[in-house]
């Protein structure tokens, strides 16, 4: 009854911001896809942290709308895949991990570590396999050895050689992107349609 498949929201609206409205929509209809449209590029990260699957800059060309609609179609047909869980171990404890609980994934020699709030969980998958499994707008590979969950990012700052230092909400871990990873991540966040 209260479910919408897709919502296009402006960031700047008279009584409530599009970001606030997106939060409300996600509470009542969590499977709704949200696309933000705005004249301001600086809200891209916040838009994705508020459940956005697209970010369109005004004036919006028709082909960008078509691209984002195709992306929503693809995402809606793969909703069963997004419910898949990741299993791993930390010490003697076995974890079944929901995607939303992942802060980042780190490949370290022969080991792959999934960072959740409670632990570093070792999984028996390669980072490339996890990248395919987590093929959603919220996960991005910022380095050969790192995939980050955009929803868990607290802040980013530029460091030497145009790399990004990324810190996360609720945990003290800080990771550094590669130079190329930082460039493509910035482009990803600034694109008119993701």
Image (cartoon, rainbow, N blue to C red):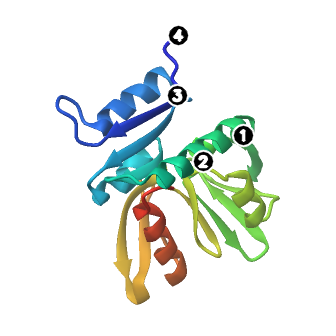
Q: How far apart are marks 1 and 4 (CA)?
A: 22 Å
Q: Mark 3 points at which residue?
A: 30
Q: Which of marks 2 and 1 is nearer the N terminus?
A: 2
**Label number found at residue 1:** 4
Q: Whole-percent x and y of residue 181?
A: 54, 75
Note whether 24 is above or below 93 in the view shown: above
Note whether 157 is above or below 154 in the view shown: below
Q: Mark 2 points at which residue?
A: 71
Q: Mark 1 points at which residue?
A: 78
* Residue lying at the far right of the rendered structure: 124
Q: How far apart are marks 2 and 1 (CA)?
A: 11 Å
Q: Whole-percent x and y of residue 142?
A: 55, 70
Single out the mark in the foreground, 4 or 2.
Answer: 2
Q: Which of marks 2 and 3 is nearer the N terminus?
A: 3
Q: Distance between the residues labelled 2 and 3?
A: 17 Å
- SS type, badge 4: loop
Q: Earlier in the sequence, mark 1 or mark 4?
A: 4
Q: Whole-percent x and y of residue 134?
A: 67, 52
Q: Distance between the residues labelled 4 and 2?
A: 24 Å
Q: In this view, does 150 lie to the left or right of 156?
A: right
Q: Is disc 4 surrounded by few (<14), some (14 to 19) or many (20+) residues within 10 Å?
A: few
Q: Earlier in the sequence, mark 4 or mark 2?
A: 4
């Amino acid at each position: 009854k209260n479910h919408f498949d897709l919502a296009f929201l402006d960031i700047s609206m008279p009584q409530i911001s599009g970001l606030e409205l997106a939060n409300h929509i996600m509470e009542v209809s969590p499977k709704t896809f949200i696309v933000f449209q705005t004249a301001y590029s600086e809200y891209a990260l916040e838009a994705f942290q508020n459940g956005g699957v697209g970010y369109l800059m005004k004036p919006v060309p028709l082909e960008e709308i078509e691209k984002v609609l195709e992306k929503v179609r693809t995402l809606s047909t793969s909703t069963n895949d997004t419910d898949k869980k990741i299993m791993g171990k930390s010490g003697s404890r076995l974890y079944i991990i929901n995607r939303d609980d992942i802060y980042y994934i780190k490949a370290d020699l022969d080991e792959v570590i999934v960072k959740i709030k409670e632990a570093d969980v070792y999984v028996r998958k390669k980072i490339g396999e996890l990248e395919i499994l987590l093929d959603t707008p919220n996960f991005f590979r910022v380095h050969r050895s790192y995939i980050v969950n955009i929803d868990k990012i607290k802040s980013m700052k530029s460091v030497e050689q145009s790399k990004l230092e990324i810190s996360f909400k609720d945990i003290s871990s800080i990771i550094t992107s590669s130079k190329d990873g930082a460039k493509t991540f910035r482009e990803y966040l600034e694109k008119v349609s993701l």
